[in-house]
Amino acid sequence: MLSLGRSFTWTGRRSAGLILYNSTPAGRGLTTDAKQQEKPKKIKFGPLSDQDRIFTNLYGRHDWRLKGALKRGDWYKTKEILLKGPEWILNEVKVSGLRGRGGAGFPTGMKWSFMNKPSDGRPKYLVVNADEGEPGTCKDREIMRHDPHKLVEGCVVAGRAMGARAAYIYIRGEFYNESSNLQVAIKEAYAAGLIGKNACGSGYNFDVFVMRGAGAYICGEETALIESIEGKQGKPRLKPPFPADIGVFGCPTTVANVETVAVAPAICRRGGAWFASFGRERNSGTKLFNISGHVNTPCTVEEEMSISLRDLLERHAGGVRGGWDNLLGVIPGGSSTPIIPRSVCDDVMMDFDDLVRAETALGTAAVIVMDKSTDVIRAIARLVEFYKHESCGQCTPCREGVDWMNSIMWRFVKGDARSSEIDMIWELSKQIEGHTICALGDGAAWPVQGLIRHFRPVMEQRISKFKATNPKEAEKRREVI
């Protein structure tokens, strides 16, 4: 599931080439870093070649058990990676530029390094968020069903980087086949000595456990997930304290997404610089994209970050149903990200920074395509209804505000509203956004904001049509409000 976290825009910059003085007497003067001058800036992204794919059994065409995983290169030189130690692993992950694949996009190397501090006697834990409940998102389940050893190996490598004693993989209760395959993979890894005591013969002890949830969307938020593991109601905690200080069972914990953890061994084997060679700066690597909705061939595909949205849809999903001109809009990162219209889709790139520029977000990279047959107001109203249902009710702005937004949105579907209520629901969404413990309130507010930002004329037209066909009902609405 989406690792619910407020959208994070990383502002760190790589230092520019150093300006040095030539110290030789004959040639004092300014010289720039030659490497930076020689390396041309990459402007074309995708398609990804097969040799660069990390998830080589995404469609389940090969054996997902240990024997098949070993043939595909999993568990190769894992012992050497573990023996190189936490600092080396963390450095490779930092060099790779990997950012969290669960939605928030926080730099992974930085996040994992928060755990790498002197021990105070408490054990440290890695918690893998496999709850994947974000509508439109279907990537983590493919990894667990068809490539579970990638995740198990990733747990060992990530655990070593942060000095963790064990990993808890919190998997959505509905994922029966996925949890079964994952449990088999863990059993095989124990039997082969790859995890457990002296994992991979490295002297590092590391256990992996599977915890099954009960399908609550809110448990994709890291602290609600921790509460659920502890046997409590899945309700987000106030932060601070952050999980890196007080997490599961009161011990230092890092919560990471399935895809984020699963790519760690490949980064360590091939090198952080290899991973960083894909995508734009600050948007590095390969990414699993889920393409659904009004396309000819919906799919989950691994592609290079920063590929254009149009290229992604036409190359892998057979294009928009009825052609590109029939496109109405796209939700680019799962249901909680704002919709963008066709005019924006023409040239937007699928990465964190360019989608922020387009006033939306990459999120989980779950691309939901809508053609011109879509009732866009009804589509967004249905999403708001989902968030209303999944709210834990702990925060007043979310509990009351999303319920109010839901009522107004369904009136907008009919057109039974006043034009001034468009501004009212916009203001309401702003009062919810950023005023709750977790980001579920933000996730409910952003689809409404995207609708108003780009499809306000459609909403006004619907209201006008209702007034024309139902003058008595429209008059009542005018008097009541």
Image: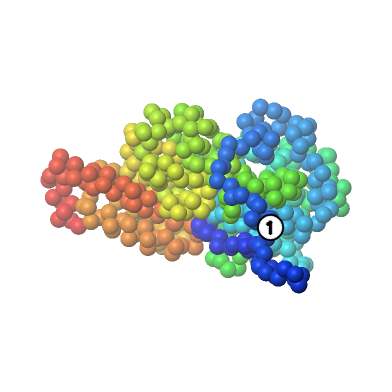
Q: Provide residue 269's location: percent of width, then percent of height.
A: 76, 45
The residue drawn where x is 78% and y is 35% is: 70
The residue where tag 1 is placed is: 34
| 235 vs 419, nearest the viewer | 419
How many labels sit on residues? Answer: 1
Q: Provide residue 184's location: percent of width, then percent of height.
A: 73, 37
Give the residue at the far front of this rendering. 26
The residue drawn where x is 47% and y is 50% is: 355
Left or right, 478 with respect to 131, comes to left
| 212 vs 208, nearest the viewer | 208
Can the viewer see residue 437?
Answer: yes
Left or right, 242 with respect to 375, comes to right
| 290 vs 166, nearest the viewer | 290
The residue drawn where x is 44% and y is 63% is: 434
Q: Secondary structure at mark 1?
A: helix
Indicate the quadrant containing the C terminus: top left, top right, bottom left or bottom right.
bottom left
Q: Quadrant of residue 17?
A: bottom right
Left or right, 130 with respect to 449, comes to right
Task: Relative to 465, say whether 21 is above or below.
Answer: below
Q: Amino acid at mark 1?
A: Ala
Q: Quadrant of residue 125?
A: bottom right
Question: Dot 1, crowdedness within 10 Å: few (<14), some or many (≥20)?
Answer: few
Q: Provide residue 219's location: percent of width, then percent of height.
A: 55, 52
Can the viewer see residue 214?
Answer: no
